[in-house]
Amino acid sequence: MNIRRIQLRGSGVDKYPAKQHVRAVASKLGQSDGLIYLLGQYGFTIEDSDIPKTWRQRRYFYYCSGVDVPNCCLTYQIEKDELSLYIPEIKPERVLWEGRGPTIQEAEDRYDVDSVYLNGQLFDHLEHWIAAKPQSIFYILHPDQSPADVKFPRADSSKLKHAIELCRAIKDPHEVECIREANKISADAHRAVLANICRFKSEAQIQGIFEDRCISRGAKQAYPVIAASGENAGTLHYTKNNEALRGRQFVCLDAGAEYQCYASDVTRTFPISGSWPSHEAKNIYGIVQMMQEHCIEKLKPGVKMYDLHTLAHKIAIAGLMALGILHNGTPEEIFEAGTSRGFYPHGLGHHLGLEMHDVSGIPVMRYSLQEHRELLAPCGEDQPPLEEGMVVTVEPGIYFSRYELQRAYLPSPIHSKYINRGVLEQYWAVGGVRIEDDILITSSGYENLTTAPKGEEAIGIVRKCAENARMGRIEAEMQGCTHPGCD
């Protein structure tokens, strides 16, 4: 894929390709006339408080504007190919307290739009458009997002969302670069965790240093940090991050930076010490590593994630049978029974972009529980294949959720006969292993956008941390022994 820079006039800063995006959306609508209206996110305070809520721009609005400022909206006249941005008026009495937003001139220079107006002008502009185009369609995202006090003869809230999602499925070069940068920041934060893990005493410290590295590089969190140690890693979306690391074998760190509203989604599982803590831990990591490597190497346009998800399950079954955790059946019987979902309960991956679980009119994995066999995968065989320009995650895992296995699998006559309880007991402490990378689908295959260390590279960083800590203790002891008055 050729990377084409879109730049601000007279600067080296990339300009978000909003006009290109909204034109593509209009094309998906299939109309030569009409008005698209999108509302940005307004600022709010917490209920019964004057503390503002954490503000986050609406992603459908951002895709068509590139504007990460509160209280804005936009219109796009399809026939005229005219994209207009409406921004809040600057209130001098509030600037001292809150700072100010952009002026009209600043917004015109910063954003890829044809014109910029104040919010107060929107009503008159819409009334004028209705008078000139009474039979044209007014496209809105949701019924409750139509501007108040304006009556539109032909308003449509059924098509715009889907049209934008179809466009968002395929990333343009600017979007790819944002995701790539988010991954670079994430990789730096993951390295910082590995380089300090031997000195940490709690999951909270892992979260703290990860967020510190992201914020210091101008990034946010794409989603809440999951810093799950020991059996906590058996909870897929564990976010308490408040337990001690002492006595734990693994940490499953699922954490990704968000850069200019684009997400990364990265998971690494690693031992807290500089070596494999047990044969069980090493063996499970090896199976998950094999699941990911075999699935990634098959990525290219035309491939279905359903088929790769099935492949991941079959590799998991073979590995768990080799360890004796699964037994008393053939791999085919265990696969058809769906028993492997007790250890690998989620999908292989998802779209990535403006959301960590990016929306898409071209779903690569959509949940379907209509047939028993589809309990194995959160999608059906009829889902469309991958296309060039998609960015997807590949995130296989194997988990030992004591609660889930004891609730749904060990009591079941369908599944319990295939699970060796005696061997399973040896694996509770592993908790769970997940490895996740972000992959760009290219014309000839794929490009892995994730550069965070994993496997032996990650363990090497942890080992160096442990060695440095050990040398530091020895040096401190030596200094202590030579101190006057030391016995």
Image: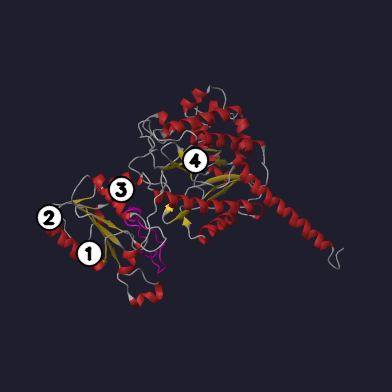
Q: Kindly report the distance in space between the C-alpha atoms of the residues bearing marks 2 and 3.
A: 24 Å
Q: Residue furthest front?
A: 10
Label 1 element class? helix
The correct choice, above or below, for 143 with respect to 344 in the image is below
CB under 8 Å between callouts 2 and 3? no
Which circle's residue, 4 or 1, is located before the other in the chain?
1
Residue marked by disc 1: 122
Tell which of 462 and 43 is nearer to you: 462
**Circle 4: residue type:** Glu
Q: Hey, what amino acid is under mark 3?
A: Ile
Between residue 174 and residue 432, name the one nearer to us: 174
Q: Name the residue under label 3.
A: 164
Element carrying mark 2: loop
Classified by dominant secondary structure, the portion drawn in magenta counts as loop
What's the CA distance linking mark 1 and mark 3?
23 Å
* Residue at the spot of label 2: 134
Residue 259 place in picture, x, y as percent: 45, 55
Separation (CA) of disc 2 from disc 4: 50 Å
Q: In which quarter of the image is residue 17?
A: bottom left
Q: Which residue range is magenta in the image?
A: 43-67
Q: Which residue is drawn at 71% across and 54% down?
A: 468
**On the picture, is 91 further left or further right than 435?**
left
User: Circle 4 is placed at which residue position?
Assistant: 395
Comparing marks 4 and 3, which lies closer to the viewer? Answer: 3
